[in-house]
Amino acid sequence: MSVTGMTGFGRAQGEGHGHGWVIEARSVNGRTLEVRLRAPGGFEGLDGEARKLAQSRFQRGQLQISVSLRRQEGAADVSINADVMGRYLQLAGELVARGAAPPSADGILALRGVIESGEGEADADTRAALHGAMLATLETALDALKGARDDEGLRLAPVLAGVLARIEALVDEAEKQAAAQTEAVRERFTRRVEELLPDAEDYRERVFAESAILAARADVREELDRLRVHVASARDLLGQAGTGRKLDFLMQEFMREANTLCSKSATSALTAVGLDLKAAIEQMREQVQNVE
């Protein structure tokens, strides 16, 4: 089977140009493909690229991509705040004049506010280089997400195949039970007429004609035939990629036929099979919501 899921998580990280970054991509079920990107200021241009990369890998699902960026240790600009150091030296001079030992250079530099670390935004050239490097990391994260969705599909495939086999078996059982429909309808109608009209012998031909009409209305062969066609279609779709929306629509058709079968049922046995059939279809419909 080629079933692919819609939920998963992918993560990748990189470093370069004095920075390190982490990109996380996660997805959940969705009727269409929606991509949302959260990136640091100055890197909004990644949004359009992220959408193109996602569209080349996925057809459905709600994707949330987050990008975090930080300067690497030692990569920040370091400077001395001359004003702050000057005030410290002035106070130190007053203490020395009173007899205190003069301060050492490393002691002055260790005081709060003397040394400043620049964490400003990267310049245009650095941002351009980072943009290209982060795109490569984004591809890696999306590939990891696709792998997770493929793994979910591998787990979904046998579940869907099992439920579909259950539906097919119930259609077979419904066909067996439906064979008794015509006679059951005729007997029920004849008995009711005899209860109301003791001399029903005079109306035998009319009773037979009316019972035949009722039996025709209760005939479920068309519904069973369409259910078999739907089973074959579902099996074909499960062997193809990207058919989640078609399967979702097909489940509606399954349920429509099952509802009609139950409404036409004239025996408790067929009704019971019809209810089991509806339960199995609903179970498959829930699983199909996870298929891309």
Image (spheres, rainbow, N blue to C red):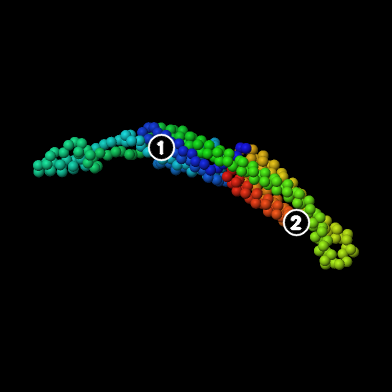
Q: Quadrant of residue 110?
A: top left
Name of the residue lying farthest toward the right: 202
Amino acid at dot 1: Trp
Compared across the picture, whether 236 is left or right of 80 comes to: right
Instruction: Give the total of numbered labels.
Output: 2
Q: Quadrant of the C terminus?
A: top right
Q: Earlier in the sequence, mark 2 or mark 1?
A: 1
Q: Name the residue type under label 2.
A: Thr
Image height of 63 relative to 18, above or below: below
| Of the pair 118 and 288, the residue shown nearer to us | 288
Q: Position of residue 266 (x, y in %)?
A: 76, 57
Is 177 positioned to the left or the right of 78 in the image? right
Q: Residue at x 88, y 59 (%)?
A: 205
Mark 2 burial class by Cα count in 10 Å: few <14, some 14-19, many 20+: some
Q: Are marks 2 and 1 in contact (CB under 8 Å)?
A: no
Task: List x then y, in percent, for residue 163.
Answer: 64, 45
Q: Is residue 213 visible?
A: no
Residue at the spot 13% in from the left edge and 38% down from the top edge: 102
Could you tell whether 45 is left or right of 60 in the image?
left
- Can you tell which mark lies on residue 151? none
Specify the label residue 267 is tagged with: 2
> How far apart, in angstroms, are the residues tagged by discs 2 and 1?
67 Å
Up the image or down, 36 lies above or below 124; here it is below
Residue bearing the label numbered 1: 21
Q: Sort mark 1 into few (<14), some (14-19) or many (20+) by Cα contacts within 10 Å.
A: some
Q: Residue at x 63, y 50 (%)?
A: 282
In this rendering, does residue 287 appear at all?
yes
* Residue 86 appears left or right of 43: left
Mark 2 or mark 1, whichever is nearer to me? 2
The quadrant in which the N terminus is found is top right
Q: Indicate the secondary structure of the residue bearing disc 2.
A: loop
